[in-house]
Structures are given as structure tokens and as C-alpha cells.
Amino acid sequence: MKYALDTNIVVAALNGLGFVRVKLAALHAQDVVLPAPAVAELYFGARASSRVNENVARVDRLVERFAVLPFDEAATRRFAEIKAALRTIGRAKSDFDLAIASIALAHGATLVTHDAALLDGTIAGLLVEDWLAVKSL
């Protein structure tokens, strides 16, 4: 199984939070991918922090370890389908959330997130897991 990590899960991993760290350690690097918009958010967070060089280096190491999935043609088509479907039911989501979800869908990955907007079941076909909701190891 391939897991696409949302920004909040990567931040939890970087901060060494419980089950996220354990789960990542148990997986092979090729089973974990980073959607490009999540990487952009990580680099922004690093650049906006008080320890820019240290945090950019941490993100660099992640990008070296895990494949970064682009917002490619397949993902852009999924994005448009999802956004249109959500608009018809009045359930808008941020474009970054939709881009991350569409990349996971386009590449057949389970999205690992703690974002309630992505865990609400409104994106058809999206498989999601919340590793931060796990209370014990």
C-alpha cells in the first residue's frame, strides 16, 4: 500500500509524535510519498520559522527520502472533478487540500491526514487514515 502524507502528518513526524513516527519507521520509503503541495507548505513553514536554515534542511532530508508526487495532468483532472462535485453539494474545500487529495487519488495512494476537511468522506474514492487519532501504540 502507498501512503501520501498530508502536511500535518509530516509535521507530526518531524516533531516525533507517537504513532506517526512508529508507523513511518515500519514502512519502506518507497511506500511513502509526499504530494508536491504538501512539500510547498512544508518549505513555506520552514521559511517562515525562526530557524530557517535548520528547518529547510529538515524538509530537504524528507524530500531526499520520499518520492514527491507532482500535480500532474491526472491529478489536475481529478482536482477539477472533485471541486465541481463538492460545489454541487455545497461543501467547498481549500484548493491546497483538494490538490493534495487529487494527487493521492490519481496515484492510488491512501491519504494520511489529520485535516477534518479531508476526513469527512465527501471526496468520492479517497482512502484516508488519521495516524494522529491513534491513542496507543
Image (spheres, rainbow, N blue to C red):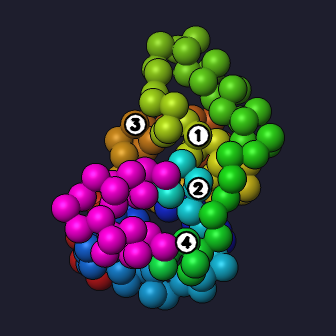
Q: Secondary structure at mark 2?
A: strand
Report if the CB atoms under discs 2 and 1 are less than 8 Å apart. yes
* Mark 3 residue type: Ala
Residue beneath label 1, please? 99
Q: Secondary structure at mark 4?
A: helix
* Residue 3, image quadrant: bottom right
Report if the CB atoms under discs 3 and 1 are less than 8 Å apart. no
Q: Nearer the viewer, residue 58 or 65?
A: 58
**Is tag 3's residue or tag 4's residue first in the polypeptide sequence?**
4
Task: Find residue 35 and name its label.
Answer: 2
Task: Find residue 117 and name its label.
Answer: 3
* Mark 1 residue type: Ala
Q: Marks 3 and 4, how far apart in space?
A: 25 Å
**Is tag 3's residue or tag 2's residue first in the polypeptide sequence?**
2
Residue at the left extreme, as displayed:
50
Q: Nearer the viewer, residue 81 or 39?
A: 39
